[in-house]
């Protein structure tokens, strides 16, 4: 187990139909945070580009790709260009009955990193069949016609069998991750503290002290795990909360800036414009969103500068 139970999120499902299936435009703020959960996950990239950080490895994806995220995989996702992604999460226990007669159904998840990659081989001739199954599954799920739950189950079963049968790699070359399970847990602990106390004026030294590492060593491991520096991650959290407050309240912008940990209004306005792409006052009166563009905007603008 890569992450302790206290760091693993519990995904709630309907008992009779334990699956969530929907599209996301861009990457929601939740997916930009480093997290792990107890559900199994399938992502199909319908268009655009981006990348995942999964257990310290970067997985770049593009339109047509399919990724599998295992329970307990510590991961976060980022958009780089016009991303539309189908996201399926489901409870492994849904397949307990089928596992009694076919124990290999969930091998792509159980043997992840041993015989299977998170990112399926995009050049494999069976990829079109897998994509078709996922699209038909979504059509049934959204249509809600009689016995649609059984059809969704059958399509998902066919998908899992297809991956297990055709995408197993006997001589799998492991990625170049140099982040150990213990280090992953330490980074998740730090991100959890930062998420809970995002307004605190953290210094790199204070964050490093939470992991008993030197600032330089901590910063290096954090970047390889999360895909950005610790202070940039902190800015991301503060902007996320500020964006939400701007949408949902009529409080003064300066008060929101101070509450979210920005030292001055001018600093807040500058960082907001740079990373979000517009001024804070322009968010007022807009339709509430998940603020999905934070990461993609500041990556396109160069990232680290102005992280204070």
Image (cartoon, grey):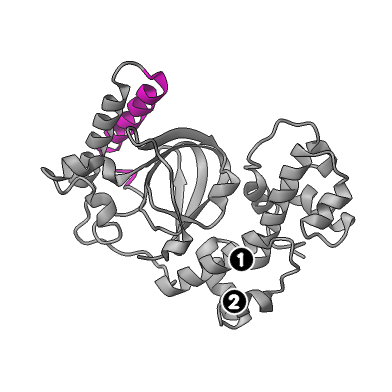
Residue 193 numbered mark, or none:
1
* Residues packed near mark 2 inside 10 Å, few (<14), some (14 to 19) or many (20 plus): some
From the top left corner, tell me how far across and down residue 303 is, in percent. Answer: 68, 58
Label 1: state its secondary structure: helix
| C-alpha span from label 2 to label 1 | 9 Å
Which quadrant is home to the C terminus? bottom right
Q: Answer whether labels 2 and 1 touch (C-beta < 8 Å).
A: yes
Determine if residue 302 is in view: no
Residue drawn at (36%, 54%) of the image: 71
Residue 210 numbered mark, or none:
2
Q: How many marks?
A: 2
Residue drawn at (33%, 47%) of the image: 120
Above or below, 34 against 178 in this view is above
From the top left corner, tell me how far across and down residue 244 is, in percent. Answer: 71, 43
Between 121 and 104, the one lying in front of the other is 104
| Residue projecting furthest to the front | 15
From the top left corner, tell me how far across and down residue 90 is, in percent. Answer: 36, 41
* Mark before the other along the chain sequence, 2 or 1: 1
Label 2: state its secondary structure: loop
Residue 86 shown in magenta: no
Answer with the quarter of the image where residue 5 lies.
bottom left
Above or below, 251 against 232 in this view is above
Residue drawn at (56%, 79%) of the image: 217
Q: Say whether residue 268 is left or right of residue 169.
A: right
Q: Main secondary structure of the magenta part?
A: helix
Which quadrant is home to the N terminus? bottom left
| Residue projecting furthest to the left | 101
Residue drawn at (67%, 55%) of the image: 237
Determine if residue 227 is in view: yes
Span colored in magenta: 121-144
Above or below, 160 against 229 in this view is above
Q: Say whether residue 232 is left or right of residue 266.
A: left
């Amino acid at each position: 187990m890569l992450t302790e139970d206290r760091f693993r999120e519990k995904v709630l499902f309907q008992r009779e139909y334990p699956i969530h299936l929907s599209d996301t435009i861009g990457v929601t703020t939740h997916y930009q945070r480093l997290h792990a959960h107890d559900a199994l996950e399938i992502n199909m990239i319908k268009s655009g580009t981006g990348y995942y950080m999964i257990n310290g490895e970067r997985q770049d994806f593009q339109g047509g790709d399919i990724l599998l995220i295992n329970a307990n995989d510590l991961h976060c996702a980022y958009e780089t260009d016009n991303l539309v992604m189908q996201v399926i999460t489901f409870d492994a226990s849904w397949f307990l009955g089928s596992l009694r007669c076919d124990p290999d159904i969930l091998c792509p998840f159980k043997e992840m990193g041993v015989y299977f990659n998170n990112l399926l081989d995009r050049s494999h001739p069976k990829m079109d069949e897998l994509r078709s199954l996922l699209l038909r599954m979504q059509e049934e799920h959204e249509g809600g016609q009689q016995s649609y739950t059984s059809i969704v189950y059958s399509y998902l079963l066919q998908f899992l069998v297809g991956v297990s049968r055709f995408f197993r790699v006997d001589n799998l070359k492991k990625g170049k991750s140099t982040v150990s399970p213990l280090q992953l847990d330490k980074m998740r602990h730090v991100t959890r503290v930062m998420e809970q106390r995002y307004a605190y004026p953290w210094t790199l030294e204070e964050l490093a002290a939470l992991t008993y590492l030197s600032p330089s060593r901590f910063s290096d491991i954090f970047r390889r795990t999360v895909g950005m520096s610790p202070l940039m991650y902190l800015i991301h959290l503060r902007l996320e909360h500020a964006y939400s407050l701007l949408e949902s309240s009529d409080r003064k912008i300066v008060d929101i800036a101070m509450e979210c940990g920005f030292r001055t209004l001018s600093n807040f306005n500058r960082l907001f414009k740079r990373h979000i792409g517009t001024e804070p006052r322009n968010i007022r009166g807009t339709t509430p969103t998940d603020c999905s563009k934070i990461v993609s905007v500041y990556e396109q603008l160069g990232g680290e500068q102005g992280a204070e």
